Amino acid sequence: MIRYVLTRLWQAALTLVLASIVVFFGVRQLPGDPALALAGEEASPERLAAVRADLGLDDSLLVQYWRFVVNALQGDLGQSTRTGTPVTELLGATLPVTLWLALYAIVVAVVVGVALGTLAERYRGRWPEWMANAAALVGLSVPNFWLGILAIVWLAAGLGWFPASGYVPVTSDPVGALHHLTLPALILGTSLAAVIMRQTRASMIETMKTDFVRTARAKGLSRPRVLFRYGLRNSMIVVVTIVGLQLGGLISGAVVTERIFALPGFGKLTLDAVFTRDYPVIQAVVLVITLGYVLINFAVDVLYSVINPKIRVGGTA
């Protein structure tokens, strides 16, 4: 176990280093000059040189990268070249919004996906399975931005069930925060719920064909009891895998949803940073997302052994 943890930590550190190299040198290949964006189109060459020197852009790329790594290890991710605000403050203000949205979307997707998948397996060849498959097909086929617009028109503006935009901090008003995040979370979790539904259904169908299920049925256990006790538990490995792979994707892919519902989250911060060539913010965003992927994958590996005792994190059964 200790050897496995140390190996994963080493792999995580290597992944973060490679990600920092790619993003640092990659963003500097973007067209445009952050000094020019900050100083203005009419700035004199002397003013541009002063801004570049103040931002440290007149040093070589290797010197800039080394300074970035040293400062990052000390918890200093620099300052926004657009506003002058420390990047850590920007992350602290926007990241919780996206995290709450992503976690809410995950809960919605897991509950809906597992319920529909179980229903589809329980009533195979009958109308509940057809309805569940139709719902999954819609979730996979219709873009989130279109569903978001329809939800705002019908559920927010038309029926008034949810607010069309805005955000309330969870710490100040949990009920209000849930009310504002429910509609975006439903839209963001739609496609993930469809994937979970299809995978849960397929996994449960395979599980119900195994020998230990036949033995349980032969001992007199009812099919619904076997379905929930054995089929659903074994299907959770598939669900955990999907959630682990998609949670980081939801954090990084919530840009469109946040723009539609005017949420002040990670997506808005990322877009503003890209448009203004805000190097420190872009670097911090990518590193945070990479770190999130690494931690989530590690947690998924640990959950495997919790769900199925036969699986050991060391790779042996």
Image (cartoon, rainbow, N blue to C red):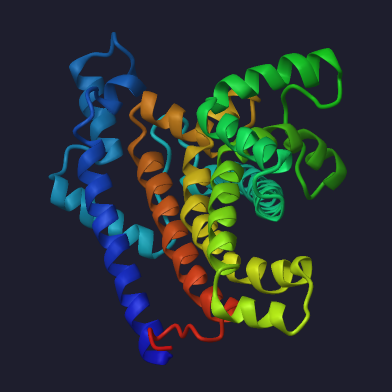
Task: Return the x and y of residue 49 as percentages of the image width and height.
Answer: 20, 27
Quarter containing the C terminus: bottom left
Identify which residue, 313 or 43, lies in the foreground: 313
Quarter containing the N terminus: bottom left
Identify which residue, 96 or 249, lies in the foreground: 249
Residue 60, by quadrant, is top left
Residue sitting at 66 percent across and 66 percent down?
Answer: 232
Task: Return the x and y of residue 244 as percentages of the image width and height.
Answer: 50, 59
Q: Which residue reaches farthest bottom? A: 2
Residue sitting at 37 percent across and 59 percent down?
Answer: 72
In the image: residue 59, left or right of residue 126: left
Task: Return the x and y of residue 13 as percentages of the image width and height.
Answer: 32, 69
Identify which residue, 317 or 305, lies in the foreground: 317
Residue 69, by quadrant, is bottom left
Eyeballing the image, is 44 above or below 70? above
Q: Count the marks.
A: 0
In the image: residue 281, left or right of residue 235: left
Residue sitting at 36 percent across and 90 percent down?
Answer: 3
Eyeballing the image, is 147 above or below 299? above
Residue 165, by quadrant, is top right
Q: Which residue reaches farthest top? A: 42
In the image: residue 185, left or right of residue 57: right
Identify which residue, 93 or 144, lies in the foreground: 144
In the image: residue 273, left or right of residue 148: left
Task: Return the x and y of residue 30 as percentages of the image width and height.
Answer: 23, 29
Eyeballing the image, is 249 above or below 30? below
